[in-house]
Amino acid sequence: MLTVCQSDMVNALGRSQNTVITRVRGLEYSHGQNGARRYRLADVLPTIKPKDRQHVPALFELAADDGEELWAGDNAVPRARRIEAWLRSEQLERAFGARVTFTNALAASVQSSVLFEHLEALRLKLILTDPVLKWTVLGDADALPPFEHWAVPYAITNARYENLNFEEKEAA
Protein backbone atom coordinates (compact mmCIF):
# COMPACT_ATOMS: atom_id res chain seq x y z
CA MET A 1 0.00 0.00 0.00
CA LEU A 2 1.33 3.43 -0.90
CA THR A 3 1.46 5.84 2.03
CA VAL A 4 2.63 9.40 2.52
CA CYS A 5 3.39 11.42 5.62
CA GLN A 6 2.60 15.07 6.21
CA SER A 7 6.14 16.17 5.31
CA ASP A 8 5.81 14.34 1.97
CA MET A 9 2.66 16.33 1.27
CA VAL A 10 4.33 19.61 2.26
CA ASN A 11 7.28 18.85 -0.04
CA ALA A 12 5.24 17.61 -3.00
CA LEU A 13 2.44 20.15 -2.91
CA GLY A 14 4.42 23.17 -1.75
CA ARG A 15 1.81 23.89 0.91
CA SER A 16 2.34 24.78 4.56
CA GLN A 17 2.27 22.22 7.35
CA ASN A 18 -0.95 23.82 8.66
CA THR A 19 -2.65 23.50 5.27
CA VAL A 20 -1.67 19.84 5.03
CA ILE A 21 -2.85 19.12 8.58
CA THR A 22 -6.20 20.74 7.78
CA ARG A 23 -6.62 18.71 4.60
CA VAL A 24 -5.85 15.32 6.17
CA ARG A 25 -7.84 15.90 9.34
CA GLY A 26 -10.18 12.96 9.82
CA LEU A 27 -8.26 10.55 7.56
CA GLU A 28 -7.15 7.23 9.01
CA TYR A 29 -3.42 6.91 9.51
CA SER A 30 -0.78 4.56 10.82
CA HIS A 31 2.40 5.46 12.63
CA GLY A 32 5.62 5.33 10.67
CA GLN A 33 9.20 6.00 11.58
CA ASN A 34 9.67 8.42 14.49
CA GLY A 35 5.90 8.44 15.04
CA ALA A 36 5.13 10.21 11.75
CA ARG A 37 1.55 9.78 10.65
CA ARG A 38 1.33 7.83 7.39
CA TYR A 39 -1.81 8.20 5.28
CA ARG A 40 -2.95 5.99 2.43
CA LEU A 41 -2.19 7.83 -0.78
CA ALA A 42 -5.60 6.82 -2.16
CA ASP A 43 -7.20 8.65 0.78
CA VAL A 44 -5.00 11.74 0.45
CA LEU A 45 -5.61 12.32 -3.27
CA PRO A 46 -9.23 13.51 -2.88
CA THR A 47 -7.99 16.21 -0.48
CA ILE A 48 -5.86 17.76 -3.22
CA LYS A 49 -7.39 20.89 -4.70
CA PRO A 50 -7.51 21.46 -8.49
CA LYS A 51 -4.76 24.10 -8.30
CA ASP A 52 -2.40 21.48 -6.80
CA ARG A 53 -3.14 18.60 -9.18
CA GLN A 54 0.06 19.17 -11.16
CA HIS A 55 1.99 18.08 -8.04
CA VAL A 56 0.32 14.66 -7.81
CA PRO A 57 3.16 12.81 -9.63
CA ALA A 58 5.62 14.15 -7.03
CA LEU A 59 3.39 12.77 -4.28
CA PHE A 60 3.49 9.34 -5.92
CA GLU A 61 7.30 9.55 -6.09
CA LEU A 62 7.55 10.35 -2.37
CA ALA A 63 5.09 7.63 -1.35
CA ALA A 64 6.40 4.67 0.60
CA ASP A 65 5.34 1.23 -0.62
CA ASP A 66 4.83 -1.48 1.99
CA GLY A 67 4.55 -4.14 -0.72
CA GLU A 68 0.87 -4.89 -0.03
CA GLU A 69 -0.86 -4.27 -3.34
CA LEU A 70 -3.90 -6.54 -3.01
CA TRP A 71 -5.67 -5.34 0.15
CA ALA A 72 -8.02 -2.40 -0.43
CA GLY A 73 -8.31 -1.75 3.30
CA ASP A 74 -11.17 -1.28 5.69
CA ASN A 75 -14.09 1.05 4.99
CA ALA A 76 -13.19 0.66 1.33
CA VAL A 77 -16.46 1.51 -0.43
CA PRO A 78 -16.77 5.09 0.86
CA ARG A 79 -13.05 5.63 0.32
CA ALA A 80 -13.32 4.37 -3.27
CA ARG A 81 -16.33 6.60 -3.92
CA ARG A 82 -14.41 9.65 -2.63
CA ILE A 83 -11.46 9.07 -4.94
CA GLU A 84 -13.76 8.31 -7.86
CA ALA A 85 -15.52 11.65 -7.35
CA TRP A 86 -12.11 13.39 -7.43
CA LEU A 87 -10.99 11.84 -10.73
CA ARG A 88 -11.09 13.65 -14.06
CA SER A 89 -12.82 12.17 -17.11
CA GLU A 90 -9.70 10.58 -18.67
CA GLN A 91 -8.84 9.04 -15.30
CA LEU A 92 -12.36 7.67 -14.95
CA GLU A 93 -11.99 6.08 -18.39
CA ARG A 94 -8.78 4.35 -17.30
CA ALA A 95 -10.47 3.14 -14.10
CA PHE A 96 -13.35 1.75 -16.16
CA GLY A 97 -10.91 -0.06 -18.45
CA ALA A 98 -9.13 -1.60 -15.46
CA ARG A 99 -12.48 -2.76 -14.07
CA VAL A 100 -13.43 -4.38 -17.37
CA THR A 101 -10.07 -6.15 -17.59
CA PHE A 102 -10.37 -7.31 -13.97
CA THR A 103 -13.90 -8.64 -14.53
CA ASN A 104 -12.85 -10.52 -17.67
CA ALA A 105 -9.84 -12.03 -15.91
CA LEU A 106 -11.93 -13.06 -12.91
CA ALA A 107 -14.59 -14.61 -15.15
CA ALA A 108 -11.93 -16.58 -17.03
CA SER A 109 -10.26 -17.80 -13.82
CA VAL A 110 -13.06 -18.66 -11.43
CA GLN A 111 -15.14 -21.81 -11.50
CA SER A 112 -17.17 -20.80 -8.44
CA SER A 113 -19.79 -18.08 -8.35
CA VAL A 114 -19.06 -17.17 -4.73
CA LEU A 115 -16.69 -14.35 -5.64
CA PHE A 116 -19.18 -12.98 -8.15
CA GLU A 117 -21.58 -12.22 -5.30
CA HIS A 118 -19.14 -9.44 -4.41
CA LEU A 119 -18.32 -8.33 -7.95
CA GLU A 120 -19.68 -4.78 -7.79
CA ALA A 121 -17.87 -4.05 -4.53
CA LEU A 122 -14.68 -5.62 -5.88
CA ARG A 123 -14.88 -3.54 -9.05
CA LEU A 124 -15.46 -0.36 -7.04
CA LYS A 125 -12.61 -1.04 -4.58
CA LEU A 126 -10.16 -1.89 -7.37
CA ILE A 127 -9.07 1.76 -7.56
CA LEU A 128 -7.71 1.56 -4.01
CA THR A 129 -5.01 -0.92 -5.02
CA ASP A 130 -1.60 0.54 -5.84
CA PRO A 131 -1.26 -0.76 -9.41
CA VAL A 132 -4.70 0.40 -10.50
CA LEU A 133 -4.31 3.71 -8.64
CA LYS A 134 -1.04 4.43 -10.49
CA TRP A 135 -2.60 3.53 -13.83
CA THR A 136 -5.76 5.52 -13.21
CA VAL A 137 -4.22 8.69 -11.82
CA LEU A 138 -0.87 8.82 -13.64
CA GLY A 139 -1.59 6.76 -16.75
CA ASP A 140 1.31 4.44 -15.88
CA ALA A 141 0.50 1.34 -17.95
CA ASP A 142 3.58 -0.46 -16.59
CA ALA A 143 2.00 -0.37 -13.13
CA LEU A 144 -0.96 -2.55 -14.14
CA PRO A 145 -0.78 -6.08 -12.78
CA PRO A 146 -1.14 -9.20 -14.92
CA PHE A 147 -4.87 -9.42 -14.22
CA GLU A 148 -5.06 -13.06 -15.33
CA HIS A 149 -2.91 -13.96 -12.29
CA TRP A 150 -3.86 -11.10 -10.01
CA ALA A 151 -7.68 -11.04 -10.20
CA VAL A 152 -8.43 -14.10 -8.07
CA PRO A 153 -6.02 -13.28 -5.20
CA TYR A 154 -7.35 -9.71 -5.16
CA ALA A 155 -10.96 -10.96 -5.12
CA ILE A 156 -10.32 -13.48 -2.34
CA THR A 157 -8.53 -10.84 -0.26
CA ASN A 158 -11.27 -8.22 -0.62
CA ALA A 159 -14.54 -10.15 -1.02
CA ARG A 160 -16.94 -9.20 1.74
CA TYR A 161 -20.42 -7.81 2.05
CA GLU A 162 -20.41 -4.02 2.05
CA ASN A 163 -23.05 -1.37 1.59
CA LEU A 164 -22.64 -0.07 -1.96
CA ASN A 165 -25.13 2.74 -1.49
CA PHE A 166 -22.84 4.84 0.66
CA GLU A 167 -23.50 8.56 0.48
CA GLU A 168 -21.17 10.93 2.25
CA LYS A 169 -22.95 13.34 4.55
CA GLU A 170 -22.07 16.94 3.95
CA ALA A 171 -20.91 19.02 6.87
CA ALA A 172 -23.43 21.56 8.08
Image (spheres, rainbow, N blue to C red):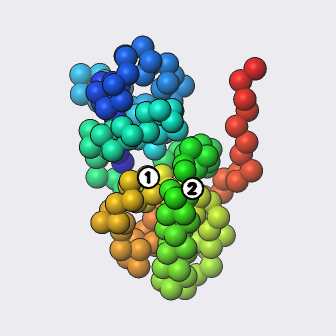
| Residue for badge 1 | 137
Task: Please indicate whether residue 14 sits to the left or right of residue 117 in the image.
Answer: left
First in sequence, mark 2 or 1: give its number. Answer: 2
The answer to which quarter of the image holds residue 17 is top left
* Residue 55, percent from left and from top: 36, 37
- Residue 89 badge: 2
Task: Please indicate whether residue 39 sits to the left or right of residue 170 in the image.
Answer: left
Q: What is the residue that sits farthest to the left in this orientation?
A: 34
Identify the residue at image location x=36%, y=29%.
Answer: 13
Label 1 crowding class (10 Å Cα cut-off): few <14, some 14-19, many 20+? many
Identify the residue at image location x=48%, y=52%.
Answer: 128
Label 2 sits on a secondary structure element that is helix
* Residue 17, above or below 80: above
- Residue 38 badge: none
Label 2 crowding class (10 Å Cα cut-off): few <14, some 14-19, many 20+? few
Asked whether residue 140 is in view, the answer is: yes
Q: Nearer the viewer, residue 55 or 19?
A: 55
* Residue 30, percent from left and from top: 38, 31
* Residue 141, above or below 41: below
The amino acid type of the residue labelled 2 equals Ser
The answer to which quarter of the image holds residue 96 is bottom right
Identify the residue at image location x=30%, y=40%.
Answer: 58
Identify the residue at image location x=50%, y=56%.
Answer: 91
* Residue 36, percent from left and from top: 31, 24
**What separation in Å lies between label 2 and label 1 (alpha carbons)?**
11 Å
Q: What is the residue that sits farthest to the top in this orientation?
A: 18
The amino acid type of the residue labelled 1 equals Val
Labels 2, 1: front one: 2
* Residue 51, percent from left and from top: 47, 32
* Residue 131, above or below 7: below
Asked whether residue 72 is in view, the answer is: no
Number of numbered discs: 2
